[in-house]
């Protein structure tokens, strides 16, 4: 600093108004070149500041800087694709009652009601026509002679025919032979011989239908039975005396008649 001040004083001494500096004496330049060399002048002032130099080469890569501050939040992106169906939610609250539906179909027919009270008595009707009557079919027959004891089952014949309406009783075989479908009643009575059992059957065709028994221990045993049968045309009803049985004369009988048509 002290040096700079000294230099400024020296400069101000040697500068002129036109900016020319005088290192040499006026008019003496040619002579002085060889023989009269003066003392060296004061050192000149430094030149003006030079032009900037050319750009230097790139330096070495610096170290990685510290992490910067977090940037501002980005804009909301476009919606993604629809995800899979989620699990079933809880049951919602009950909705309000809907409007009344249309009328239903008629129901099934109901059961019959209970029986009503009896009505009042009607007036007397007119006399009706005669109804359909069953045909007049009736017979009654008895045996006038003894029979047995028989050595095998034997059909009993009744030689006294008291009645044979409709001719359904065959006097030769003593079978009732049905000529008209219907319901019939038959009754048979037997009287055994003294101290001999009397077993008999009321037969329908070849079938034993109803037994009779007169017990010989009673002396003259008696047996009776009655049967009601539905018969069709050509069926036979008759009396069969069982093996070893016997009948007295006069007391045994076989009778029958129709009850209803069909
Ligand atoms: C009698 O009854 C039998 C059996 O039901 C029947 O086949 C027949 O046609 C009847 N006969 C008459 C004359 O009605």
Image: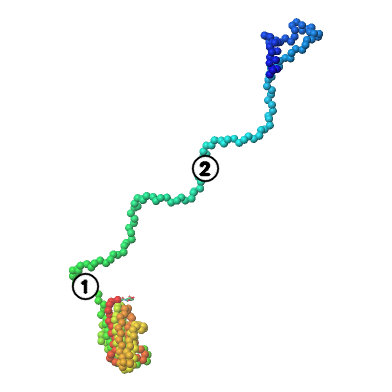
The image shows residue 221, relative to residue 85, as above or below, that is: below
- CA separation, marks 1 and 2? 103 Å
Residue at 67% over, 32% down = 61
User: Does residue 193 appear anywhere in the picture?
Assistant: no
- Category of crowding for the residue at label 1, using alpha-carbon neighbours closer than 10 angstroms: few (below 14), some (14–19), many (at least 20): few
Which residue does the numbered mark 2 point to in the structure image?
80
> Taking 49 as reference, is 93 above or below it?
below
Where disc 2 sits, the SS reads loop
- The quadrant holding residue 133 is bottom left
Q: In which quarter of the image is ligand 1?
A: bottom left
Q: Where is residue 83 in the image (x, y as percent from the top left)?
A: 51, 46
- Which residue appears at 77% of the width and 6% of the height? 28
* Closer to us: 28 or 249: 28
Q: Tell me whether the residue at label 1 lies in contact with that at label 2, contact meaning CB atoms closer than 8 angstroms.
A: no
Residue 86 visible to an observer of this rendering: yes
Q: Mark 1 points at which residue?
A: 129
- The answer to whether residue 120 is above or below residue 62 is below
Question: Mark 1: is the Cβ under 8 angstroms from ligand 1?
Answer: no
- Tell me residue 21's x, y (percent): 71, 10
In the rendered image, the quadrant that contains the N terminus is top right
**Which picture quadrant has residue 127?**
bottom left
């Amino acid at each position: 600093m002290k040096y700079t001040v000294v230099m400024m004083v020296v400069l101000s001494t040697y500068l002129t108004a036109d900016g020319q500096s005088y290192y040499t004496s006026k008019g003496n330049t040619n002579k002085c070149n060889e023989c009269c060399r003066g003392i060296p002048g004061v050192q000149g002032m430094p030149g003006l500041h030079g032009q900037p130099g050319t750009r230097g080469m790139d330096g070495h890569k610096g170290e990685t800087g510290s992490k910067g501050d977090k940037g501002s939040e980005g804009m909301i992106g476009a919606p993604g694709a629809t995800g899979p169906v989620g699990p079933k939610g809880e049951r919602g609250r009950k909705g309000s009652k809907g409007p009344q539906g249309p009328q239903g179909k008629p129901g099934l027919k109901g059961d019959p009601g209970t029986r009503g009270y009896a009505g009042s008595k009607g007036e007397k009707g007119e006399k009706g026509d005669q109804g359909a009557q069953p045909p007049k079919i009736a017979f009654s027959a008895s045996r006038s002679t003894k029979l047995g004891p028989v050595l095998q089952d034997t059909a009993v014949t009744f030689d006294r025919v008291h009645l044979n309406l409709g001719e359904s009783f065959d006097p030769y075989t003593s079978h009732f032979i049905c000529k008209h479908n219907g319901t019939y009643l038959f009754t048979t009575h037997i009287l055994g011989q003294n101290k001999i059992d009397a077993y008999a059957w009321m037969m329908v065709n070849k079938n034993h239908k109803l037994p009779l028994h007169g017990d010989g221990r009673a002396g003259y045993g008696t047996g009776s039975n009655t049967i009601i049968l539905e018969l069709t045309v050509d069926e036979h009803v008759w009396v069969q005396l069982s093996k070893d049985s016997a009948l007295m004369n006069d007391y045994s009988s076989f009778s029958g008649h129709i009850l209803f048509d069909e």
